[in-house]
């Protein structure tokens, strides 16, 4: 080794006991080149140990979300795939909670129809079976009202005699007796005509309000029941107009954030899902600005080392490749300074022999040419007597 430079005859002379370098002898000088431990697998963390060489440790893909299946792809890395919460039961609403996983909430099958028995089938969902309205009364017409259920309307026993009150026996039917025309019905205007008999004119219960259900009770008269406008849709504002009835106005789901996709679920309402700004380029820093959205800025690969060539690979990121300072001149010592770069310092060819002419050839290095003597040299030796003090 001269001035920090290792000289060699073969690659074996350059062994540095570091499994992370490839040791080569190039033109008599040792070179230790870092090996590449990238296994091209995004599911491993690649490192290098001087003792053992490359290591590839599996990364952990866990997003802490019970609603995803966590896996890893060699080409793209961690994958989080949504699980299916479908329980194949038409009687439940299937959702998913990040903390607990799948939720199966029973649906309501109430069709607000008093004329049906409401149930639910796992295969087909809600069932609405018509009820039977039969009071075994010969004096009624049996029917059903969605709002109130079974209706048993008296049949008319009018005998076309204005002077009689027509009645009916449950077992036999009509009975025509000369009685009053009062039908005891608060929903009718009672009168009697000698030619036509008793008259029961329905009163009007219309309150000109589309937001009420108008009906009449025989005992109390007109009833105005508010209607329900709930459409079971979390994405609408439900209201009612006296003129037109129920209104369902779509709500606006906008959080003013360019980093989310705004949507609406009928079951849960507004959803703001984060967008992915990943451009799969290791040479950029991926961020998202609320005002403008995705921002992919180039990273700086400058290692402030004049002895490396800095570049960037989309797949692996920054690369710092050592530069070659070999000037192909055997008369210089080639080295590199991290601050200034390549240095080519002239070597010394002085062999300390006055009988040679020292020079240097760029191709072969130092040359020591013997001097040619034109005259004999007289050598003078001084002798000292051993007894001389």
Image: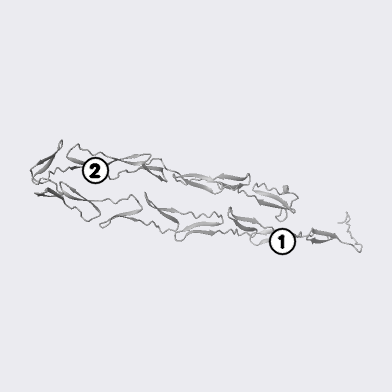
Picture coordinates of residue 271, whole percent (x, y):
40, 52
State if disc 1 and disc 2 touch (CB < 8 Å). no
**Quarter where residue 388 is shown:** bottom right
The numbered mark, 2 or 1, whose residue comes first in the sequence reads 2
- Among the 4 quarters of the image, the one containing residue 131: top left
Q: Is residue 56 visible?
A: yes
Residue 10 placement, left or right of 271: right
Looking at the image, can residue 352 be seen? no
Viewer-nearest residue: 9 or 144: 144
Nearest the camera: 303 or 332? Answer: 303
Q: Position of residue 263 (x, y in %)?
A: 41, 54
> Of residues 74 and 248, which is closer to you in this image?
248
Which residue is at a point 56% across and 44% down the rendered structure image? 57
Counting from the top left corner in percent of width and height, residue 181 is at: 10, 46
In the rendered structure, the answer to whether residue 136 lies left or right of residue 83 reads left
Q: Residue at x 10, y 41 (%)?
A: 176
Q: Which residue is mark 1?
A: 344
Q: How is the image coloured?
A: one colour
Furthest toward the top, the residue is: 171
- Residue 113: mark in rendering: none
From the viewer's side, name the closer residue of 237 and 369.
237
Which mark, by number, is residue 144? 2
On the rendered image, what quadrant is the C terminus found in?
bottom right
Residue 167 rendering spot, x and y as whole percentages:
12, 41
Which SS class for mark 2?
strand
Does 121 appear above or below 311? Answer: above
Q: Is disc 2 surrounded by few (<14), some (14 to 19) or many (20+) residues within 10 Å?
A: some
């Amino acid at each position: 080794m001269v001035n920090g430079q290792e000289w060699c005859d073969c690659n074996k002379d350059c062994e540095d006991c570091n499994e992370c370098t490839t040791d080569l002898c190039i033109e008599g000088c040792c070179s230790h080149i870092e090996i590449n431990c990238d296994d091209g697998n995004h599911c491993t963390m690649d490192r290098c140990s001087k003792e053992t060489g490359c290591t590839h440790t599996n990364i952990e893909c866990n997003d802490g979300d019970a609603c995803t299946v966590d896996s890893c792809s060699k080409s793209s890395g961690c994958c989080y795939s949504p699980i299916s919460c479908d329980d194949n039961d038409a009687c439940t609403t299937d959702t998913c909670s990040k903390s607990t996983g799948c939720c199966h909430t029973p649906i309501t099958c109430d069709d607000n129809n008093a004329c049906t028995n409401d149930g639910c089938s796992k295969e087909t969902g809600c069932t609405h079976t018509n009820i039977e309205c039969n009071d075994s009364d010969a004096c009624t017409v049996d029917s059903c009202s969605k709002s109130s259920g079974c209706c048993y309307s008296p049949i008319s026993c009018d005998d076309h005699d204005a002077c009689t009150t027509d009645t009916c026996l449950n077992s036999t039917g009509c009975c025509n007796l000369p009685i009053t025309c009062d039908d005891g019905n608060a929903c009718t205007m009672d009168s009697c005509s000698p030619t036509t008999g008793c008259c029961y004119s329905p009163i009007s219960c219309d309150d000109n309000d589309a937001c009420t259900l108008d009906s009449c009770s025989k005992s109390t008269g007109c009833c105005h029941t508010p209607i329900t406008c709930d459409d079971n849709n979390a994405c609408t504002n439900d209201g009612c107009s006296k003129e037109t009835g129920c209104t369902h106005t779509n709500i606006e789901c906008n959080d003013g954030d360019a980093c989310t996709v705004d949507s609406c679920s009928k079951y849960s309402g507004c959803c703001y899902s984060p967008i992915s700004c990943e451009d799969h380029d290791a040479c950029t820093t991926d961020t998202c600005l609320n005002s403008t959205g995705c921002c992919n800025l180039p990273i700086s690969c400058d290692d402030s080392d004049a002895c490396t060539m800095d570049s960037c690979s989309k797949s692996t990121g920054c690369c710092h490749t050592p530069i070659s300072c070999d000037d192909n001149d055997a008369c210089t010592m080639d080295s590199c300074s991290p601050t200034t770069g390549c240095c080519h310092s002239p070597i010394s060819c002085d062999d300390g022999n006055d009988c040679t002419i020292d020079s240097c050839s760029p191709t072969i290095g130092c040359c020591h040419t013997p001097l040619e003597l034109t005259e004999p040299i007289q050598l003078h030796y001084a002798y000292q007597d051993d007894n001389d003090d």
